[in-house]
Amino acid sequence: MIWDFFPVVAAAHLGLNAAALGLVAARRPKPATVLVVAGVTLLAAFLAGIWLDMGRPPLRTYGETRLWYSLGVAVLALAIHLRTRQTWSLVYGASMAALFVGITWAVPESRSRELLPALRSPWFVPHVTVYLLAYAAATATSIAALLDLRKPIPGGRNLDALLAATVVLLSCGLLFGALWAKQAWGSYWTWDPKETWAFLTWAGYTGVLHWRRSRPAQATAGAWWLVALWGVLLLAWFAVGYLPGGANSVHVYAN
Amino acid sequence: MNHGWFRWYLGRTGSVPAALVSLAAVALHAGVSQVAPQWHVFGWTSFGVSVVAVLVNMAAATWLRILERRAEPGWILVHAGLLMAIGAALLGGLFATRGKVVVREGDASERVVDDRGNTIAKLPFQVLLQDFQLEESVPPLTLVDGSARAIVFRKGDPVVELREGAKGHLRGIEFEVVRFLSRAGLDHDTVRASSDSFAPPAALVRYRMAGAGTGKPEFVSEGWITSGGNTIPTITQPAGVVRLAMALPPAKAYRSVVTVVERGQKPREAVIEVNRGLSLGAWTLQQLDYDRLAGRASRISILEAVRDPFAPWVKIGIWTTLAGIAVFALREWRRMT
């Protein structure tokens, strides 16, 4: 199995991103960007390899989704950097991508080639990948909010754009999920624990988006909420299975 | 309707603070429901009221923006779409009929029952179950304790699917699948391929306990393992303090081959599968479940029957919202500097 090569891939990925962080610290963003691109390419190739090898989209277990998240944060960070030329996005992209690849390396999990019947749907890949991109954007938003609280940027334009991207992606993930749920279970929405936490995350980021746009002068309060909301997001992603009633969620596939 | 007081009213009910309060009320209900069932804390009425408050807010805000001609297309599509989707879903929750149709192979049913088995509706047609089909995945290897009563396989242990030729390591046990039979039976104490379509799979496993460094001699053995069924009892193999066993094969896909019989109409054959429901007039049938104990031998199919006149409006609302999100995203990308 190609998964057997993961320690080598993970070590190389961590090395590339660590070197990129060093170059950003040395105020050399161009070679740092090249290294982040190399990390993205390596991870994308590995994901494509395990997809082909396992014969199913590698989006089923927490470990597999963490790799997509790592890919998503790095791609998003590169897009922000190329658009705005701000180096904080490279720091965010390289460190978060490396962190989540590192967690996947450190936490072993059972891997199966099989896919449950409910996951055999054309909505599986768009729903999960859009959500992982949303999580990447939400992380960037929360980090940007934290930076903004320390040293406000006049206008806060980038934070608002990131927040908008987060809400757009979370909304798409939620709606794709509803369309899929109708096909699989006959209902668009059932207030299943995972759905409920997905709604809470969406409501939080959407609420702050409305607050910041209607009260630009009081945007700082919204920034604190954005920092706190990352905790809600992590809860929705990883901890639902451990919450009361979570074990009965129809979304718990990893076990 | 352009009176000043009406605009004032729309301005208040459609304001962002009103949106945040109503959204927070829904989120509070939803959040509390994760700790305690919400009907024990607030009740469905207050939950419904908070959802209606969100709808009133969106309706007022949309109306006001149209009146004042300051509506951006993305904004209008997102809010009007959500209004339609949530409103239709709420009405569906009040007026839709949802239940199960439990049908045996060779039998027909028109009864829609609730969880207690009480009839709640009758379909305008009968569903005759011709065949229930279940495809199984390749079963994984598992570990059970010495008495073969409890599974000791842990999360994080590698999953080894018992395909022919598969090799792996599990807790110091090195093994290889020498042969795999998708249907096995016992013939005079010898495991052989079986023609019984409900026979369980079996795998011939060669395994070795690594003795290197432990001071213990290396132990090599070979034997059949199977989860057991109608043609063969469960077989496990000893490997030190644990035993190698075959987990029950998980379902890969399951479907019902049915004939829909409606008075005055020609019988119609259809296949109902997970993610592939069947719409017939006002009703939609989904593949829900089967007899889990019988597994592949299940002769019962459990279908979900839903009659929701508002469901098409939910779908239109969702796609309208997605279109609005696309317009909004494009505008935001252009604004980003």
Image: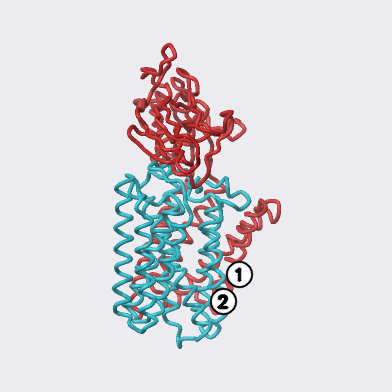
Chain colours: A cyan, B red
Look at 55% across and 60% down and name the residue there.
A235
Q: Position of residue B74 (x, y in %)?
A: 39, 69
Q: Position of residue B291 (x, y in %)?
A: 51, 28
Which amino acid type corresponds to the residue marked 2 in the rendered image?
Trp
Task: State the SS at label 2.
Answer: helix
Cα distance in 3D space between marks 2 and 1: 18 Å
The residue that mark 2 highlights is A224
Look at 34% across and 73% down and name the residue there.
A78
Tell me the subunit letter for badge 1: B
Does residue B215 appear in the picture of this structure?
Answer: yes
Which amino acid type corresponds to the residue marked 1 in the rendered image?
Val
Look at 44% across and 57% down and name the residue there.
A104
Q: Position of residue B19 (x, y in %)?
A: 56, 70
Q: Position of residue B314 (x, y in %)?
A: 45, 53
The residue that mark 1 highlights is B21
Q: Residues within 10 Å of mark 2 (few under 14, many from 20)?
A: some
Question: Where A155 sits versus B273, above or below?
Answer: below
